[in-house]
Amino acid sequence: MFETIRQRIRDMKTIKALCFEAEKIANAKGHKEPGAEHFVLSALALPDGTARKVLARLSANPDQFEAAITQQYEDALRHVGFELHADAAVQPEVPMPLPTSTGPYKTQPSAQSLMHTLTREIMVKYQKENAAAPLLGAHVILAASAAQYGVATRAFRAMGIDPSQLADAARAEIMVSQKP
Amino acid sequence: MSKLQTLPSPNDPAQALAAVVALRLMADQLERKAVAVALAQGWSWSQIAEALGVTKQAAHKRLASAFTKSS
C-alpha cells in the first residue's frame, strides 16, 4: 500500500517532467502549445528509456522521429503543390517565449487526447493489474498509438510504422519492463 | 482566391487535412517572422493589424507575447 502511494508520487513527477519537456520542445519549434508529437519526443527523452526501446523493437531509430515530423510536413505540403524544404516552413527564426510556471498548462487537442488515453485508460488498466506498476515512456507511446490521424501518427507512418505495430511493440516493451 | 478551381483536390481527406495543418503552421510562422521585421522597422501595432486585416486588439493579443522577450 505504502509502496503504491510512493509509486503514484513518482508517476506524478514523471508526468510533470513529460509535460515540461513537451512544452519546451514545442516552444523551441515555434509552437505555442505542445501537440502529441511533442509528447512523443518528450517520452523518448525520459530516463527509463522504454519509449526508445519500443521503436528499437520495430527496427526504427528513435532519433529519427524528429526528422519524421518534418518529413510528414513536407509530404503534406507537397500534396498541395508546395515544393519547399519543410525546414523553411517549420523552423522559426523568432522563438516563442519559454515556458513559465504561471497560468494553466495548455496543450493542443492532440496532446489532450493522448494524456486522456494515458491517464484515464492505459494507466488505469495497467495499475489494476499491478498497483505498483510505474508510468513508463512506453505507456506514452502506447497512448500515441491510439490516434489514427495527426502529426504524430503521420510521423510514425513516415518511419514505416503503423499504429497497430506501434501498439503491439509498446505492449511488449511494457510487459518486459514491468516484470518483477 | 478568385480561381477556386486551382485549389488542390480534397478527395483524399487525410492528405488534404494534413496539408491544412502544415499550411496553418507555415502561415503562423510566416506571420510571426513578418511581424518581427515590421516591428524592427518601426511599424506600430495599428499598422500591423491593418495589414493583417484584423483589429489592433486581436493582433496584439495573438502576437505580442511572442515578442515580449525579443523586443
Image (spheres, helix red, strand yellow):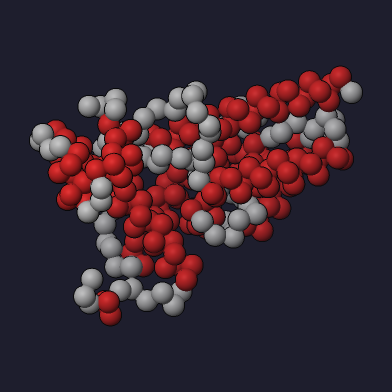
Q: Position of residue A104 (x, y in %)?
A: 53, 32
Q: Position of residue A57 (x, y in %)?
A: 65, 46
Question: For this rendering, which residue is in front, A116 or B64?
Answer: B64
Residue at figure coordinates x 23%, y 71% from the top left: B1
In the image, residue A110 sits, relative to residue A160, either above or below, namely above
Question: For this rendering, which residue is in front, A84 or A39?
Answer: A39
In which quadrant is the C terminus of chain A drawn?
Answer: top right
Q: To which quarter of the image does residue A73 belong?
A: bottom left
Question: For this rendering, which residue is in front, A164 or A121?
Answer: A121
Residue at figure coordinates x 83%, y 25% from the top left: A4
In the image, residue A66 sits, relative to residue A98, either above or below, namely below
Q: Position of residue B27 (x, y in %)?
A: 29, 52
Residue at figure coordinates x 44%, y 77% from the top left: B11
In which quadrant is the N terminus of chain A drawn?
Answer: top right
> In the orientation shown, which residue stands out farthest toward the left?
B41
Q: To which quarter of the image does residue A40 belong?
A: top right
- Residue A143 visible, this angle: yes
Residue at figure coordinates x 63%, y 52% from the top left: A145
In the image, residue B39 sits, relative to residue A60, either above or below, namely above
Q: Is residue A171 left or right of residue A29?
A: right
> In the orientation shown, which residue stands out farthest toward the bottom?
B5
Q: Is residue A103 left or right of residue B60?
A: right
Q: To which quarter of the image does residue A127 belong?
A: top right
